[in-house]
Image (tube, rainbow, N blue to C red):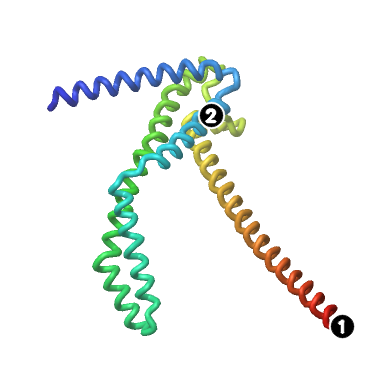
Amino acid sequence: MEELFDTAWEYIHTLIQQGVITLDYLLSYLHFLGPIPVIFLLAAMTVAITKVLKKYIKTKRLVTLENDFQYWLKVREEAMRCEDREKGKTLAKNIDTAKLNKAYYDFFLEGLLLGFITFYLPVISMAAYINEAYRSERLLELFGRDHILQFGNSEPVLIGGLFCYILSVLFIICSLFIIKLMRKRNRTLKIVQHNHDGQCSEQFEERVLQQSAISRCT
């Protein structure tokens, strides 16, 4: 078993080294843009990878636990709709104790483990690469300065590549979240406007029919 793990680790180590060499080679053509665009591009690529992994990697256990949690949540909601409020609260409490709490924690832990693979692992891996590839000595060699940004003159605050990467990831995630909210809001407004237009058209048709009926009677 130890020999199997050693062999697997050798393959993984070789794969990581080849990935780093390939990424260094590809990024060498973009260094003329400066360190900030390159790091922002790496952050955008990392977020894109996490989105793809989150979309396509979903275990059968997670799906089962999610369905189980949603089922018991609906049962609890039905219990809370009971006409006798005290009886409904008692039923909901029993459901929480017997099924819902366990279903929630199992679903949460499974999602957390899957989230580590689909989100945290790519982000941490890229952070480790940037921390090594764009360290102070490397920045000085590539761009002529040992930092990315500088704030202040007398006692300047120097910003390195890793900090810029984290800020870029947070900025991209927040931007995508805001865009998603705006699209959802616009979609809701369109649905409301469509329903309003439909009601107005129905009212207009009713008026036309009423007027035509009156004209026929006169």
Q: Which mark sits nearer the N-terminus, 2 or 1?
A: 2
Q: Please, is residue 15 above or below residue 127 in the view?
A: above
Is the N terminus in the top left, top right, bottom left or bottom right quadrant? top left
The location of residue 211, given as percent across then percent down, is 81, 76
Local crowd size for mark 1, using a 10 Å CA cut-off: few (<14), some (14–19), many (≥20): few
Type of residue at label 1?
Thr
The location of residue 95, given as percent across then percent down, is 28, 70
Q: Residue at 64% across / 58% down in the picture?
A: 189
Spatial separation of the CA atoms under disc 2 and disc 1 = 75 Å
- Tell me the residue that label 1 is attached to: 218
Comparing labels 2 and 1, the label whose residue is closer to the camera: 1
Question: Residue lying furthest bottom in this view?
Answer: 84
- Tell me the residue that label 2 is attached to: 41
Q: Residue at 57% across / 48% down in the picture?
A: 178
Compared across the picture, whether 171 is left or right of 17 comes to right
Q: Residue at 51% across / 16% down in the picture?
A: 28
Between 100 and 134, the residue placed more toward the observer is: 100
Q: Secondary structure at mark 2?
A: helix
Compared across the picture, whether 143 is left or right of 51 comes to right
Between 188 and 182, the residue placed more toward the observer is: 188
Residue 216, by quadrant, is bottom right
Whether residue 212 is visible to the viewer of this picture, yes or no, is: yes
The location of residue 182, given as percent across then percent down, is 61, 51
Between 41 and 89, the residue placed more toward the observer is: 89
Q: Secondary structure at mark 1?
A: loop
